[in-house]
């Protein structure tokens, strides 16, 4: 029993420590906080207003037009920016020697990956909730159940995207290289998630790409939560719980990949 308790605390202590370190580091760099929120906000206001003028007919159950339709997609963009770019700390830690210290320390690989992923996901969730507070301006008036389901959807998406960012950042030693590659990956992921057009309206050749995109299911679950009372299902994808499970499944795959990459790097460094 004592050995089991020691092993449990031994795992959770580094997870909590690394997670706390990510939170402190992020909020000491206020430019990252502003950038993660301001960029999607600008996208929503200017791009949403411009497209709304081009497509003035109501496209949502609330009848508020494109700004309402575009709001969930921009909320996902907040999570995407925060979760992915919070994993830049992996590259910074490698350059500073901190990561090497953690790898040779008696810390489990699950402790390292779990701490980094939970830290980035917590940051993304906090930023997402701040942007969610603007939902009434877009025409959303959801119930307590809808709000709770939206939080659950945001939390699962944050974990999934941070695990993806960890797996990608582990390969890079240059922040510039990471930025350039992730920008090529991020925007197509977002554009093909249903933020601009639903899966059911996409060309046949494009639908398989959208079905392989984890953001497609995360955005679908978020929309179902925001419209929980009106219940206008997102066509072409499973319902709320099916989309949530699909997002969680992608997250588990990314987490397992990250664990494998850390274990392999550790063997190479120590071998």
Image: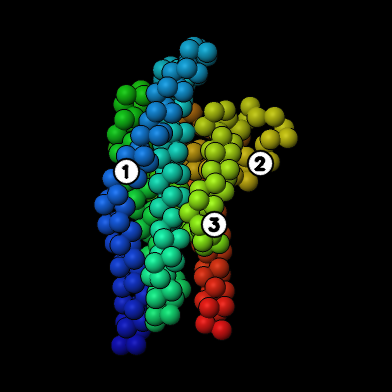
Instruction: Looking at the picture, tell me which residue is in the foreground, 19 or 135.
Output: 19
| Residue at position x 58%, y 43% in the image | 184
Instruction: Looking at the picture, tell me which residue is in the foreground, 205 or 153.
Output: 205
Mark 3 and mark 1 lie on one chain; the one further toward the N terminus is: 1
Q: Which mark is residue 248?
A: none
Above or below residue 80? Residue 96 is below
Secondary structure under the numbered disc 2 in the rendered image: helix
Calculate the distance from the C-alpha at mark 3 to the C-alpha at mark 1. 23 Å
Calculate the distance from the C-alpha at mark 1 to the C-alpha at mark 2. 34 Å
| Labels 1, 2: front one | 1
Q: How crowded is mark 1: few (under 14 residues within 10 Å), some or many (20 or more)?
A: few
In the rendered image, the quadrant that contains the C terminus is: bottom right
Above or below residue 211? Residue 108 is below
Location of mark 3 (residue): 168
Location of mark 1 (residue): 31
| Left or right of 199, for residue 137 | left
Location of mark 2 (residue): 209
Secondary structure under the numbered disc 1 in the rendered image: helix
| Labels 3, 1: front one | 1
| Residue at position x 63%, y 46% in the image | 212
| Labels 3, 2: front one | 3
In the rendered image, the quadrant that contains the N terminus is: bottom left
């Amino acid at each position: 029993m004592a050995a089991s308790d020691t092993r449990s605390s031994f795992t959770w202590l580094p997870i909590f420590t690394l997670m706390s370190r990510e939170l402190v580091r992020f909020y000491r760099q206020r430019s990252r906080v502003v950038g993660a929120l301001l960029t999607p906000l600008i996208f929503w206001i200017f791009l949403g207003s411009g497209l709304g003028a081009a497509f003035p007919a109501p496209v949502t159950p609330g009848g508020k037009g494109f700004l309402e339709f575009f709001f969930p997609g921009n909320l996902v963009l907040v999570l995407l920016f925060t979760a992915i770019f919070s994993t830049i700390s992996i590259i910074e830690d490698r350059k500073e020697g901190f990561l090497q210290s953690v790898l040779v320390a008696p810390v489990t690989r699950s402790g390292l990956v779990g701490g980094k992923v939970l830290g980035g996901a917590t940051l993304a969730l906090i930023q997402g909730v701040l942007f969610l507070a603007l939902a009434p301006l877009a025409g959303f008036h959801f119930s307590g159940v809808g709000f709770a389901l939206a939080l659950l959807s945001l939390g699962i998406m944050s974990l999934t995207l941070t695990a993806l960012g960890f797996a990608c950042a582990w390969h890079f030693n240059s922040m510039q290289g990471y930025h350039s590659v992730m920008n090529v990956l991020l925007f197509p992921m977002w554009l093909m998630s249903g933020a601009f057009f639903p899966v059911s309206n996409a060309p046949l050749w494009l639908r398989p790409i959208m079905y392989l995109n984890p953001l497609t299911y995360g955005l679908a679950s978020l929309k179902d939560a925001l419209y929980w009372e009106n219940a206008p299902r997102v066509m072409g994808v499973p319902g709320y719980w099916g989309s949530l499970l699909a997002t969680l499944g992608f997250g588990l795959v990314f987490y397992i990949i990250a664990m494998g990459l850390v274990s392999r790097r550790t063997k190479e460094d120590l071998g």
